Amino acid sequence: GNSVTQMEGPVTLSEEAFLTINCTYTATGYPSLFWYVQYPGEGLQLLLKATKADDKGSNKGFEATYRKETTSFHLEKGSVQVSDSAVYFCAHSGYSTLTFGKGTMLLVSP
Amino acid sequence: DAGVIQSPRHEVTEMGQEVTLRCKPISGHDYLFWYRQTMMRGLELLIYFNNNVPIDDSGMPEDRFSAKMPNASFSTLKIQPSEPRDSAVYFCASKDRGLGNTEAFFGQGTRLTVV
């Protein structure tokens, strides 16, 4: 079946540190892949997406590359800020449904 | 477009009462999803609709939960009777079929507390 596995948190970093949040998936066909971000008290917002193998999604300094051979879509940022503190969800989409990982909390301290 | 609109934002009710959560999807979107989020279980898909028709309700926890979509611009999630373990944040999301696998847009959520 379809599933998304992402690293458990919380991930605790100091400002300007490098961030990696791992995400792997199982799916039939050729899904699109997404990273969503949820700030405290808010709904999920799309952060970036990639729709085919080797695509790189990027936004606000975050990047993730669709790796079909390793079924992965790891999220990276070169220098995190305190304002990046949030919960990050990896997800994949088939024709109609959207399957989410359990979320990874990121805490960035000044 | 104003995005996905949910109401109320917060609901506090007593155990045994009926609770109705409301959602207005983005105009033109074909799919509507209801999710529940808790600390223990994370984000769970409860049910989704395509063109107002329920497609998969296997995530609905029990018969106390029901969802309807009477038209393309409105959906409800009802809990009757409510129990303290139903306390959670409930999200509605909508999605366009599009030409490929498109992303879903989420509402701000309804924080439900059953006391």
Image (spheres, rainbow, N blue to C red):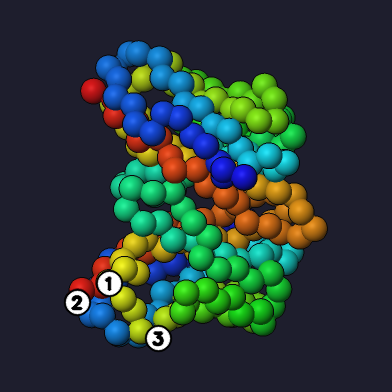
Are circles 3 and 2 on residues that touch, CB within 8 Å? no
Q: Check disc 1 and give the amino acid type.
A: Val
Q: In the figure, A86 relative to A62: above or below?
A: above
The residue singled out by tag 1 in the image is A82
Q: CA distance from mark 2 to mark 1?
A: 6 Å
Q: In the figure, A74 relative to B82: above or below?
A: below
Which residue: 29% across, 84% down? A16
Left or right: where B99 falls relative to B9: right
The residue singled out by tag 2 in the image is A110
| Rendered location of residue A55, percent (x, y) | 66, 79
Residue A31: quadrant of the picture: bottom right
Q: Is residue A50 visible?
A: yes
Nearer to us of marks 1 and 3 is: 1
Nearer-N-terminus badge (2/1): 1
Quadrant location, the N terminus of chain A: bottom right
The residue singled out by tag 3 in the image is A78
